[in-house]
Image: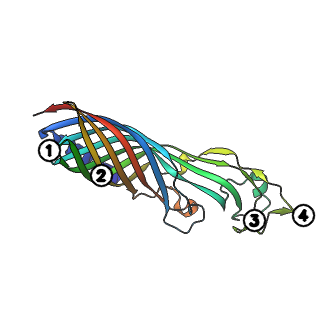
Amino acid sequence: MRKSIIFLLLFFLMVCSSSQAQQVKLGINAGISIPELRSKSSNEISKDYKSRLASVFGAFADFNISNNFSIKTFINYAGQGGKRTGMQPVTNIPQDLALMVPPGTMLYANFHNVSVLNYLEFPVMAKWEWGNSLRYYLNLGPYIGFLLSAKQKTSGSSQFFLDKGGSMPVSIQGNPLPAQSFDATTDVKSDINHINFGFTGGAGIGKYIGKSGELVLDVRAADGLTTIQKDSKKNGNNHTGGLFITLGYAKVLHAK
């Protein structure tokens, strides 16, 4: 919470300082998000997630302080998360099965698992640019994200196993349990921290169109510093990050 307050104060100061801007541009952007869930622990529940494709879209404001320097802010809907396929821990064990195994037993199964996290993100970046009809730029700064939704989507069917290698199927009186369906969507928002903080930066190209328009191609990476799980001892320790590729259009509001 302290980080989010500091960030919002920084955002306020930057926007206030933009009153001396030589030029102000407002725009919209949309594109693809290639998020990543990085595990910071050895917990089996949080390991081995791969990138998935998601969407990102929103609006931005660009406050030019000089010809080569500006402050750029975004408000973006950003898809985060990751996916995992194959043998992995089962976090939602059916109640009747849970009664058959000792408390705390980790069960495994072979299925497809997608973690779908959606945030409302507010990056604030310093931007350095150069060029004439084509404007090239680099930008860097902090961001804060507010969790909108968090779901775990699973699919496929599998037997349950006592080991990750799949050599010890769960049995009743010596008979292995038949394969079970994993087709489900589980709301896990209550297990995820609602605020995420990190740094973001990247590069892009702007092309002026007419007298007051600009087409912008932006490529930006983000690195989350906050552990997303509320209970990291139970559910592991993941940080979000990813790559965002967007196309946007900006309109010049005024120039001094």
Residue nearest the observer in this picture, 195 or 45: 45
Q: Residue furthest front?
A: 133
Secondary structure of the residue carrying numbered label 2: strand
Secondary structure of the residue carrying numbered label 4: loop
State the colouring used for the structure image: rainbow
Say which residue label 4 marks: 173
Between marks 2 and 1, how big is the CA–CA gap?
Answer: 19 Å
Callout in the foreground (2, 3): 2
Disc assigned to residue 203: 2
- Lower position in the chain sequence, tag 2 or tag 3: 3
Amino acid at pointer 1: Ile
- Label 1 Cα crowd, 10 Å radius (few <14 / some 14-19 / many 20+): some
Q: Position of residue 189 (x, y in %)?
A: 53, 46
Say which residue label 3 marks: 102
- Lower position in the chain sequence, tag 2 or tag 1: 1
Between marks 3 and 4, how big is the CA–CA gap?
Answer: 16 Å
Amino acid at pointer 4: Gln
- Label 4 Cα crowd, 10 Å radius (few <14 / some 14-19 / many 20+): few
Amino acid at pointer 3: Pro
Disc assigned to residue 65: 1
Callout in the foreground (2, 1): 2
Q: In which quadrant of the rendered view does residue 227 lie?
A: bottom left
